Each structure stands twice: as structure tokens, then as C-alpha cells.
Image (cartoon, rainbow, N blue to C red):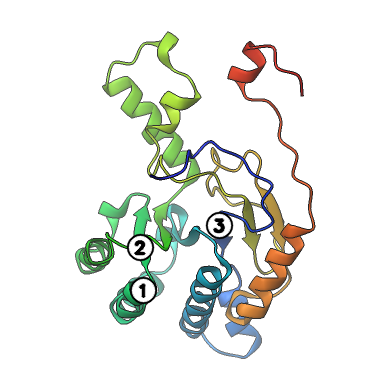
Amino acid sequence: MPSDPTTRTNDPTPRHVAVIMDGNGRWARQRGWNRIRGHREGIESVRAVVRAARNAGVRYLTLFAFSSENWGRPPGEVRALMGLLRRFLRGEVPELLENGVRVRAIGEVERLPEPARETVRWAEERTRGCTGMDLVLALSYGGRDEILHAVRRLVREGVSPGEVDEAAFRSRLYAPDIPDPDLLIRTSGEMRISNFLLWQMAYTELYVTEVLWPEFREAEFREALADYARRERRFGLTSEQLGRGEAP
């Protein structure tokens, strides 16, 4: 049985790690190359981090692979990113199956070009039975869009205002069974969460590194986990707990 997605833990190994993979373009520019070269190198970091997370016992790994804002990038770059997504999934699914990694996608996946969308759905179907780790790809994803998606579902399903609580809202998110991230890693030193998992990151620990994504590999991932393990997590009370008069 899957664990309760609302359960919070102080386990030294994060159950759910989310990653904003930033710095591909900057890495390429520093070397006089185009941005697409940076995205290609970033795929190697994706491979390394997926393996490192699985080996470390992380149960859920969510990668911010393509944001809803990324549709505004030059068409050639968008096409290249879609091609890299397809090649990554086609090439990695055998190893993912071998290691019990399930592929899942969140976001407005229907907006992806048909070849990319079909490849994502193919990877999800092929790995559906895997139970070792969930690799969650945020594709055409925006945190505000997800919140609006949940609100529209509540309205469409005729849920009355009095019935809307955190549990009802969560059940309308893209992947309500996945627990909130324990740790968010952001590369390239940018100090923001960029419209990523806004509802879910209320109590997420943040780890920001100056390392650019194409240079972020297993050693850097292990350092992020080690930093997380040294922290003492503190949680506020939920609205339900406050209503019951529970002490902090």
C-alpha cells in the first residue's frame, strides 16, 4: 500500500526529492556553445541523478523537465528539448525497468507535440508495474496552473464550499498520491522556486547550489542529501490540527 501523502517525516533520507535543473544554457555559453549543447549535456546529469537517487533509497524523484513558461523559448530550442526527451526515455526505459523505476508525468502533457506525448505515455505504460522508485517528470508544468486545475475540478464536480478542505483540494492535483517533497534541489545558484510545486512545497527543505546542472552528478547529489540529513525539520500545524486545538 502507498504511504499517506500527507505524512511528514524526519527520516535522514528524504522520501521525495524535487529538482529544478537550472544552468544548461549558462554552462554552454561559458564554453562558446549554443544552448542545445547544454541541454544535451544536462541529460547526462539526469541519468546520474536518477541512479544516485535510486541507490540512496529515495522513493520519489521529481524533475522540472519543461515548464509551462518554456513554450515561449525559440521554436528550435523547444523542438530540441522535445527530441531529447524522446531519446532519453527510449534509451533509458530498459535500465529503469531493470531497477524498478516507474516513469510518471505531471503537467499539461496533452500540450506536448504528438511524438513526445506518445513517448511519454509509452514510458509510463511500460514501467507502470515498477515499485522501486517513481521518476516524476514535470512537463508543460506550472504550479499556478496545477492549482487552477484543481479548482476547476472542484467546481466542475459541484463540490460545495463547505466540503473544500486540504484533503479535497489535494485529491484534485495532478498526482495526489505522491507525498510533498522533503527536499528541493536547485542548481545554478538562483534563489527562487520558479512556479514549481507551489502547493506541495509548504514545508520543503531548500538546497541551492552554485553548480550548473550539466556539472551536477552523483557526488553533488550525495552532498545535497548529506546537507538534508544534518537538518532538523520543523512543521507547523495543519488547519485540521489547529481546529482540534493541538499544541505546536
Q: In this view, does 121 lie above or below 197?
A: below
Does residue 39 appear anywhere in the picture?
no
Count every numbered label the image shows and give the total: 3
Does residue 112 appear anywhere in the picture?
yes
Residue depicted at 57% across the width and 61% down the height: 20
Residue depicted at 68% across the width and 75% down the height: 220
- Residue 30: name its quadrant: bottom right
- Of residue 153 and residue 142, the one placed in the foreground of this image is 153
Q: Badge 1, how many Cα within 10 Å: few under 14, some, many 20+?
A: many
The reply to whether dot 2 and dot 1 touch (C-beta < 8 Å) is yes
Q: In this view, does 104 lie above or below 81?
A: above
Q: Position of residue 172 (x, y in %)?
A: 37, 33
Q: Mark 3 — residue?
A: 18
- Residue 57: name its quadrant: bottom right
In what element is the residue under mark 3?
A: strand
Q: Is residue 161 above or below residue 67?
A: above
Q: Where is residue 34 in the image (x, y as percent from the top left)?
A: 51, 85
The amino acid marked with disc number 1 is Leu
The amino acid marked with disc number 3 is Ala
Hey, which residue is sitting farthest bottom in the picture?
32
Residue depicted at 50% across the width and 25% down the height: 166
Q: How far apart are marks 3 and 1 (CA)?
A: 18 Å
In what element is the residue under mark 2?
A: strand
Residue depicted at 54% across the width and 61% down the height: 58
The amino acid marked with disc number 2 is Arg
Q: Residue 102 carries which label?
A: 2
Q: Residue 96 carries which label?
A: 1
